[in-house]
Image (spheres, rainbow, N blue to C red):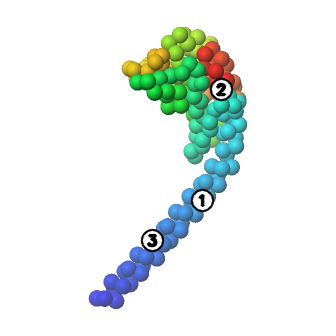
Amino acid sequence: MKKSLVEGLLITTIFLTAFIVGSAFISSAHMAVAASTSQECKNGADKISSKADASQSGNVCGIELSRDSPTLTQNGKKINDQVPMEFPYQPASASSGKNVFDLAEFTLLQSEVNKVNQYLEDHHWTVTAIHNHQFFEHPTLIYMHAQKQDNRDSILQDIKNALKKTSCDCV
């Protein structure tokens, strides 16, 4: 009985060791792939603004950009960096070449909504939602969600141009 328990523990130990080593190998290989594509993602963020931050998860390039102005507050605390605009994109399909699908979220002042909405609609974006998140921020923020599938550089240029319709001082 003891021999079979020892054998079982040995087999379990070998299996767990192989699993851990294999997981570490896959994780490091995944990180190498992400690192090799992160420069392209960073270049995409730079096309929008030198102030934009890029991060990569799998085939999704996440781009975030905080408003520098005006100062946004909630309950007296500055929140500019906590309510970034987000512009994640991913390849539209395996055979789409440089075409990507972007799901944008603009953080806007009420006075900017119509200008940005009009620009996006004129450039064939689909505006999918316009809403607020919080009640006590100042000034009141409106979040505009939009999506588009097109050439990556064209989408990034559209985002940059839409941001020029705002007072964010972030382009």
Q: In the picture, which quadrant includes the C terminus?
A: top right
Looking at numbered disc 1 in the image, what kind of residue is underneath it? Answer: Ser
User: What percent of the width, then of the height, locates residue 131?
Assistant: 44, 19
Residue that badge 3 annotates: 16
Give the position of the N terminus as an image quadrant: bottom left
Query: What is the secondary structure assignment of the residue under circle 3?
Result: helix
The span from disc 3 to disc 2 (Cα, nearest Å) is: 46 Å
Residue 87 seen in the figure = no
* The furthest residue to the left: 1
Q: Position of residue 34 (x, y in %)?
A: 63, 49
Relative side of 70 to 150, left or right: left
Say whether marks 1 and 2 touch (CB < 8 Å): no
Q: Looking at numbered disc 3 in the image, what kind of residue is underneath it? A: Leu
| Mark 3 vs 2, N-terminal side | 3
Q: State whether residue 30 is above or below residue 138.
A: below
Residue at point 60% right, 34% down? Answer: 63
First of labels 1, 2 by sequence position: 1
Q: Which residue lies furthest to the front in this view?
A: 76
The residue positioned 38% from the left and 79% from the top of the image is 9
Residue topped by disc 2: 155
Q: Is mark 2 on a helix, strand or loop?
A: helix
Precedes in sequence: disc 3 or disc 1: 3
Give the numbered dot on residue 28: 1
Q: Do the residues labelled 3 and 2 touch (CB within 8 Å)?
A: no
Residue 85 got which mark? none
Residue 44 in view, yes or no: yes
> Is residue 83 depicted above or below 30 in this figure?
above
Residue 68 image point, x, y percent:
60, 24
Front residue (pair 133, 19): 133
- How many C-alpha atoms fall within 10 Å of the one at disc 1: few (<14), some, or many (≥20)? few
Residue at x 49% of width, y 28% of height: 79
